[in-house]
């Protein structure tokens, strides 16, 4: 049986992009995440203390290293299955799905061995506060079992991407979040604050997400079905050929995104790493916002590439970069400009002194997050070898630079954050735009156009916030919200000024169409 993804061209009947619905759903999910994050992190810090709280994100980071075994296959599955379903090639789509499903089941079973070892040797992996050894093992256990269930769930989630129904995926994610957070609150209130209950809640949320995902998979892709007879070794080798380089790239990603908490814990102990982890939640929320906004572009990008319309693809990616950069400029500028009162009001007075750390963690994101729409391009084009090596090199550089700046140079936690800022900028400013232009046979500066606009918008917003603080000491949430609203209005003016005349006209026409469709819902 042939398994090559050589299928008829995309038909005109292909479903149109659902950018508006997906973007609204992403923003709604992000709003929930923001509300939960703004309240949940201080709640856990108050209930458990910084040292014990730091074990929760640290456990998730260590567990995420297990994804190195599965992420390559998952990425390749997303590409091949999207192309197959877009081209109405249901035979190959079923083969790809079943290869992914049964491979993930087998991998999850194999991962039980290192999982049990990690639980038993938890105190040798991280520095645990005295008296929390058993509780940490329970936390590890719940987190790892949830991870393994998520691996089995992953092949079913490809249907959301293939059918461009990110809105339904966010509905499942919202149910998972509410279950996870709600159960922690109930257990803390009825019983007592203990970190092992967080592991139980993580597992419960994953079970809810698994049930919802499998049900929606059947609704969205009724042509797909589970059958071990459709497992094909030739397809597995083809997927692994693409996925192998994704694994190399993912190792690099973990070394420059997920290694900082481990370094902080090993170098400075549970208390300092817990404080670092708490502050890190704000840049994490900024990344979540960029994923919520930028994530809607990937399915359309894959569909345009499937039509082999390179000119349209380039134009789409350039608009996506500028749009995402300008959208992210506001929250990044506000976070950096109001860092001190934000941390002081959110986490407590003792965290206000870490405002410079938050700035180092966040300011570079105005460039790096804007380039997110280019990230899946190499996978769509199936040019993943070079990005894999580059990302691995950048990750190793980040690890070495973090240890050097935090240790011998004596920058402490600031050295870890600075290393991440430097290496991430190298990856996304110096490599990603150049390589994306290269694989599409475009001029080298193709994806640099517009960078100045959102960098300027970010710096102006942050600078204006600093000027406000110089004349207005913000002492409560109401004052911070009012100051943020004032800066947001200024931001809108700045953004309008940096738009080109053609972009201003397009913006006006878009608003006009939205008003017309709102007044004529039929």
Image (cartoon, rainbow, N blue to C red):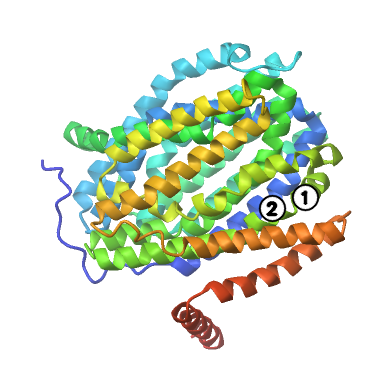
Q: Is residue 228 above or below residue 470?
A: above
Left or right? Give the position of 112 relative to 314: right
**What x and y, as percent, mark residue 343?**
77, 45
The part of the image, by quadrant, that contains residue 283 is top right
State the SS at label 2.
helix
- According to the image, label 2 marks what residue? 335
The answer to which image quadrant residue 2 occupies is top left
Question: In this orientation, which residue lies closer to the viewer: 128 or 206?
Answer: 128
Q: Within the image, what quadrant is residue 200 found in?
A: top right
Point out the residue furthest to the front here.
Answer: 409
- The answer to whether marks 1 and 2 mark residues whose Cβ atoms lie closer than 8 Å is yes
Tell me the quadrant of the picture where the N terminus can be found. top left
Rate crowding at label 1 as few (under 14), some (14 to 19) or many (20 or more) other CA atoms within 10 Å.
many
In the image, is 159 to the left or to the right of 469? left
Give left or right: position of 249 versus 46: left
Mark 1 and mark 2: span between their CA atoms?
A: 8 Å
- The number of discs equals 2
The answer to which of 432 and 297 lies nearer the viewer is 432
Determine the residue positioned at 25% across, 46% down: 382
Q: Earlier in the sequence, mark 1 or mark 2?
A: 2
- Residue 200 in view of the camera: no
- Estimate the x, y position of residue 208 in percent, counting from the top left: 56, 42
Quick check: 420 left or right of 414? left
Residue 58 horizontal/vertical position (percent): 62, 28
**Residue for point 27% across, 36% down:** 99
Q: Residue visible at 63% across and 24% down? A: 409
Note whether 305 is above or below 350 in the view shown: below
Q: Residue at x 65, y 68 (%)?
A: 491
Category of crowding for the residue at label 2, using alpha-carbon neighbours closer than 10 angstroms: few (below 14), some (14–19), many (at least 20): many
Q: Say which element carries label 1.
A: helix
Front residue of this view, candidates 346 and 340: 340
Q: Which residue is mark 1?
A: 342
């Amino acid at each position: 049986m042939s398994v090559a993804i050589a299928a008829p061209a995309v038909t005109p009947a292909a479903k149109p992009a659902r950018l508006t619905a997906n973007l609204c759903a992403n923003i709604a999910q992000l709003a929930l995440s923001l509300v939960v994050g703004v309240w949940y992190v201080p709640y856990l810090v108050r209930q458990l203390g910084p040292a014990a709280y730091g074990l929760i994100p640290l456990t998730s980071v260590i567990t995420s290293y297990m994804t190195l075994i599965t992420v390559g296959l998952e990425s390749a599955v997303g590409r091949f299955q999207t192309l197959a379903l877009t081209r109405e090639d249901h035979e190959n789509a079923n083969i790809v799905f079943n290869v992914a499903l049964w491979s993930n089941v087998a991998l999850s079973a194999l991962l039980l061995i290192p999982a049990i070892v990690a639980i038993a040797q938890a105190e040798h992996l991280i520095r645990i506060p005295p008296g929390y050894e058993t509780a940490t093992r329970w936390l590890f256990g719940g987190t790892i079992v949830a991870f393994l269930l998520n691996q089995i769930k992953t092949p079913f989630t490809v249907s959301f991407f293939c059918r461009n129904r990110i809105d339904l995926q966010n509905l499942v994610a919202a149910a998972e979040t509410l279950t996870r957070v709600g159960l922690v609150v109930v257990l803390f209130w009825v019983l007592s604050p203990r970190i092992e209950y967080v592991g139980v809640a993580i597992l419960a949320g994953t079970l809810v997400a698994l049930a919802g995902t499998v049900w929606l998979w059947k609704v969205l892709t009724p042509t797909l079905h589970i059958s071990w007879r459709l497992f094909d070794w030739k397809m597995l080798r083809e997927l692994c050929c693409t996925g192998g380089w994704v694994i190399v790239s993912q190792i690099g990603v973990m070394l420059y995104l997920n290694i900082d908490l481990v370094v902080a814990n090993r170098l400075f102990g549970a208390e300092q790493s817990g404080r670092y982890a708490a502050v890190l939640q704000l840049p994490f929320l900024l990344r979540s916002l960029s994923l919520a906004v930028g994530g809607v572009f990937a399915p359309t990008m894959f569909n345009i590439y499937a039509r082999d319309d390179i000119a349209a693809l380039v134009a789409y990616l350039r608009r996506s970069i500028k749009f995402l950069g300008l959208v992210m400029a506001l929250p990044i500028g506000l976070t950096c400009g109001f860092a001190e009162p934000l941390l002081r009001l959110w986490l407590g007075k003792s965290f206000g002194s870490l405002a410079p750390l938050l700035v180092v963690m966040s300011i570079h994101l105005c460039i790096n997050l804007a380039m997110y729409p280019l990230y899946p391009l190499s996978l769509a084009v199936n040019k993943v070898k070079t990005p894999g090596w580059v990302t691995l090199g950048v990750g190793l550089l980040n690890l070495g630079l973090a240890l050097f700046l935090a240790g011998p140079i004596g920058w402490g936690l600031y050295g870890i954050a600075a290393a991440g800022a430097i290496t991430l900028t190298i990856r996304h400013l110096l490599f990603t735009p150049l390589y994306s232009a290269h694989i599409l046979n475009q001029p080298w500066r193709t994806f640099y156009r517009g960078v100045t606009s959102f960098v300027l918008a970010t710096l102006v917003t942050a600078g204006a916030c600093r000027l406000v603080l110089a004349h207005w000491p913000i002492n409560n949430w109401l004052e911070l919200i009012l100051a943020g609203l004032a800066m947001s209005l200024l931001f809108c003016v700045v953004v309008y000024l940096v738009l080109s005349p053609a972009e201003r006209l397009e913006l006006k026409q878009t608003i006009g169409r939205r008003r017309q469709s709102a007044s004529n819902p039929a």
